[in-house]
Image (cartoon, rainbow, N blue to C red):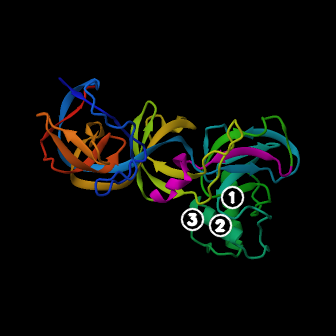
Amino acid sequence: MSTRRRGRTVAASLTGVVVAAGALVTGYTVTSRPEASASAAEVPTGTVAVKRGTVTQRFRISGTYGFDGAYTIVHRGGAGVLTGAAAPGSTVGRGGVLYRADGAAVRLLHGTVPAYRDLDIGVTDGDDVRQLERNLKALGADPAGAMTVDRDFTGATAAAVRRLQRKWGVTRTGALGFGTVVFLAGEVRVAARQIEVGGSVGPDRPVLTGTTTRQVVTADLTADRQNQIKAGDKVSVTVPGSGAVDGEVLRVGTVATSTTGENGEPGAATVQVVMRVATPKGGFSLDQASVQVNLATSQRRGVLIVPVSALLASPGTSGYRVRLASGAFVDVEPGLYDDASGTVEVGGGLREGDLVEVPAS
């Protein structure tokens, strides 16, 4: 281990963006100016070899691991007593029971058109009929293929409904009354009960809240970075107790919002970013867990890389240099900065394998 004089330090910001023509645009901040002083502090140092490899420009933000979407399941039947409900944390699939009122089950079917009427022979054609018929097919209620999936409620549709009702153990009427099923886009993960079992339930009263079963990370991104990422960009998410998992950006908000701080001053404007991630260990029990997200914005391969801590400010210029193990200085041009690995791309007079000084760890 050796020592060297450092007249100033270079700090890497988390934005990590490009340096052009040796002039630092942003990503590095000079925290003190060089001074040609014989009293400069001695800093213990070690050496690291210059490597050739890949550097990825990225920045790190805090996020929350949870589940995508939000549903509120509202009772559409008459007044009664809640006699059963799916437990928080459970998943209800197509045909499953969401809750029971006065002992009668209210079940989940898939579709984007909310239930708004009785479905029976004689109803006018509609998209709600089409989505009902798709569910009947998916649940095996039309084994002979007699029913056509369209907007028309036919005798074949009624026969399929009766088969499903027999499977469910209810009276086989061939019709679905308003309030007996709820149409949602997919299976539901129950978040909370809005009414405890045994409580009163009435028309238009919320019974359950839920989400989709798609596990996502959400994060607030400052609006000035909104254009740096897009749907499909790759991310790495560090989950407490589970390590890092890979993911990708699903969507980036388009409307910025801000909050007011304790002193009454408005906070920074942010947009919400939603990212799909691989399931980490214990993932389904990690609802609302805090995580760290590394978002990649650019990448360069086959470039020379050094630790950012090797960079020194060049005296009298706005540029940078490194010190070799021999004690000689070499001017360098920083490029992409990788916040996650603490490395930076460098151009200039360095060669692969050169040993540069860095502060001792």
The answer to whether the residues at label 2 and label 1 have Cβ atoms under 8 Å apart is yes
In front: label 3 or label 2: 2
Out of 85 and 153, give the one closest to the viewer: 85
The three-letter amino acid code for the residue at tag 2 is Gln
User: Magenta segment, which residues?
Assistant: 203-231
Q: Earlier in the sequence, mark 2 or mark 1?
A: 2
Look at mark 2 in the image and give the residue it sits on: 131
Q: CA distance from mark 2 to mark 1?
A: 9 Å
Residue 361 visible in rendering: yes
Look at mark 1 in the image and give the residue it sits on: 183
Above or below, 280 against 273 in this view is above
Quadrant position of the C terminus in the picture: top left
Above or below, 352 against 283 in this view is below
Question: Is residue 214 part of the magenta span, yes or no?
Answer: yes
- Element under disc 3: loop
Look at mark 3 in the image and give the residue it sits on: 143
Q: CA distance from mark 3 to mark 1?
A: 23 Å
Above or below, 111 against 27 in this view is below
The three-letter amino acid code for the residue at tag 1 is Phe
* Residue name at image x 70 percent, y 65 percent: 113
Out of 245 and 329, give the one closest to the viewer: 329
* Residue name at image x 77 percent, y 72 percent: 121
